[in-house]
Image (cartoon, rainbow, N blue to C red):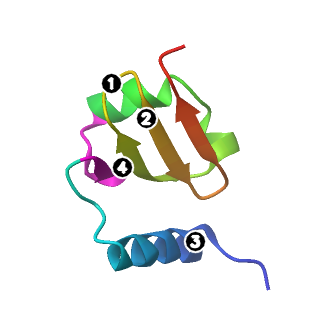
């Protein structure tokens, strides 16, 4: 039985809650404004990565996005 995007999203959110996430440096991507989301989405194609669920960040130049299909890391380049 193939897993749906909704199943994977709920599983990621459930697992994150088991580790006290989100917190001050980990965010639920869905809670960002459209403008903030678009700033991150310019660096990758959501068709390839799947729906972005969590964003781990320590600055605007260093972040990691956890999607339903892949993990994307960005170091400012």
Q: Is residue 26 magenta?
A: yes
Alpha carbons under labels 4 and 1: distance apart = 14 Å
Number of marks drawn: 4
Residue located 33% across and 52% down the image = 30
Residue reaching furthest to the left: 24
Residue 47: x percent and y percent? Answer: 66, 42
The mark found on residue 29 in the picture is 4
Q: Earlier in the sequence, mark 3 or mark 4?
A: 3
Element at badge 3?
A: helix
Residue density around tag 3, few if under 14, some if 14–19, many if 20 or more, within 10 Å: some
Residue 58: x percent and y percent? Answer: 31, 35
Q: Which residues are magenta?
A: 25-34
The residue that label 2 is drawn on is 63
Alpha carbons under labels 3 and 2: distance apart = 21 Å
The residue that label 1 is drawn on is 60
Residues tagged 4 and 1 counted as in contact (Cβ below 8 A) = no
Q: Earlier in the sequence, mark 3 or mark 2?
A: 3
Residue reaching furthest to the right: 1
Residues tagged 2 and 1 counted as in contact (Cβ below 8 A) = yes
Alpha carbons under labels 3 and 4: distance apart = 15 Å
Residue density around tag 2, few if under 14, some if 14–19, many if 20 or more, within 10 Å: some
Residue located 52% across and 51% down the image = 66
Residue 38: x percent and y percent? Answer: 39, 28
Alpha carbons under labels 2 and 1: distance apart = 7 Å
Give the vertical position of 25 relative to 36 (above or below).
below
The residue that label 3 is drawn on is 8
Which-is-in-front pick, marks 3 and 2? 2
């Amino acid at each position: 039985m193939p897993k749906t995007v909704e199943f994977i999203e709920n599983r990621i959110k459930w697992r994150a809650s088991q580790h006290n996430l989100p917190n001050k440096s980990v965010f639920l991507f869905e809670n960002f404004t459209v403008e903030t989301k678009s700033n991150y989405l310019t660096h990758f194609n959501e068709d390839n990565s799947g729906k972005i669920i969590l964003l781990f960040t320590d600055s605007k130049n260093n972040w990691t996005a956890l999607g339903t299909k892949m993990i994307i890391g960005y170091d400012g380049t």
